[in-house]
Image (cartoon, rainbow, N blue to C red):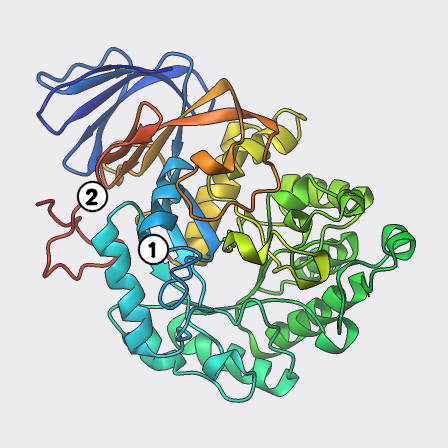
Amino acid sequence: MAELHQDNSGAYLIRGAAILGGAPEDLLIRDGVIAGRGRDLAADGATVIEAAGLVALPGMVDIHTHLREPGREDAETVETGTRAAALGGYTAVHAMANSTPVADTAGVVEQVLTLGRAAGWVDVRPVGAVTVGLAGEQLAELGAMADSRARVRVFSDDGICVHDPVLMRRALEYVKAFDGVVAQHAQEPRLTAGAQMNEGEVSAVLGLTGWPAVAEESIIARDVLLAQHVGSRLHVCHVSTAGSVEIVRWAKSRGVNVTAEVTPHHLWLTDELVRSYDPVYKVNPPLRTDADVQALRAALADGTIDVVGTDHAPHPSEHKECEWAQAAMGMTGLETALSVVQHTMIETGLMGWADFARVTSTAPAAIGRLEDQGRPLETGEPANVILVDPAARWTVDPSKMATMGRNSPFAGRELPGKVVATFFKGHPTVLAGKLNTPYRWLPENTEMPGAAPGGRN
């Protein structure tokens, strides 16, 4: 655990951290940027953080978060969700559009942006809906959202598939004008009507309606061909099957501009857990087989899958503590993602910490076009930095988490790795593993990623 020598200067000298898991070096943070990197740095009056044994990484970026606000504040708020994000090592999150009202207009995405800045824990980037009301019938105000103060670049009906191929093609064509991306929830609805879990041996034994892998794979196959045809960017949300991996790999070999994500829970958990009938394991897409898990891990390691996205989906307890058939789908993930990826990818030898930074920070920032996130930890770069204790072990207790959601599938499990500090725009939102204070934007501040950071009041 880091030792902290407090000062009031606003500068921070991190001593002896393993940058991206490499040799120990010092980092000096001042005025929102990394002011120095090297050995034996000195800075009069700076707060010193003794970081021997810690790993320094760029702040994590979640391409797929459900913050629920506006409209579902009984499940989560921007405040509680971003507190969880900061504790989990995130400095930016993309807030999905399935709020109430749906984020399908410039007004709603600007409201989400404003809520995120008022909270101040991370950079909240609104995701705009592809279709009005997520109904899949008419394109939403894509251009207006892109031109708004929120500068939306990621569009998704996540939770519902854009299943109409004509509408999907039009969306892909439309976002080209402002370098946007359509993030597809790949689920053919006619193949998953009434589905409760993965279709396979376990569903047959339990007598639950199965969710076939082809329902995901057929949509991905269609959409990569559409993206190739119109020359647009496509992002595939929460890939969950080995077949989906092969389709994405084939598309990339053809030069299709497609990226893909995998969730932490799909990197570890399998449909065998559903034998317990515990609704905490009910999720969309469903937990698959061990063969799928191994394929997903290999694909993340070799770059076929670009990023880890949490698909953080908090629910009120009454929506999960009920019989399986009536339970809501979804799991929390912001506060456990780093640990799960460390367990499944780093401790298995499939990836190192530099690879971790690529899939949790650099690549998702690039997909979302966040210019000041996912940057290298070098002098002059924005100071979005986290310190991680890879030797720490902790037991997941949902009741002690910052998120309002208690539906963690890792409850009671011992996990490795813990975030010790999170610096957002050079300001420590987390210190010594606990929330510190939020970053404060100036009330009139409207600068976007890549611009000079706003002041704190």
Q: Which mark is residue 439?
A: 2
In the picture, the quarter occupied by the C terminus is top left
In the picture, the quarter occupied by the N terminus is top left
At a point 36% along the width and 56% down the height, the residue shown is 77
User: What residue is disc 1 on?
Assistant: 78
x, y percent for residue 409: 62, 42
At a point 44% along the width and 43% down the height, the residue shown is 361
User: Is residue 44 or residue 324 the one in the foreground?
Assistant: 324
x, y percent for residue 438: 22, 42
Q: Which mark is residue 276?
A: none
Residue 19 drawn above or below residue 376: above
Q: Amino acid at mark 1?
A: Val
Q: Quadrant of residue 414?
A: top right
Asked whether residue 326 is in view, the answer is yes
At a point 30% along the width and 39% down the height, the residue shown is 384
Q: Secondary structure at mark 2?
A: loop
Residue 198 drawn above or below residue 186: above
Neighbourhood count class around disc 1 (C-alpha, 10 Å): few under 14, some 14–19, many 20 upward: many
Q: Quadrant of residue 295?
A: top right
Q: Amino acid at mark 2?
A: Tyr
x, y percent for residue 303: 62, 45
x, y percent for residue 239: 66, 55
Q: Is residue 172 left or right of residue 288?
A: left
User: Is residue 116 or residue 11 the one in the foreground?
Assistant: 116
Residue 406 drawn above or below residue 345: below
Asked whether residue 375 is in view, the answer is no
Whole-number angstrom distance, CA of label 1 to CA of label 2: 14 Å
At a point 52% along the width and 54% down the height, the residue shown is 313
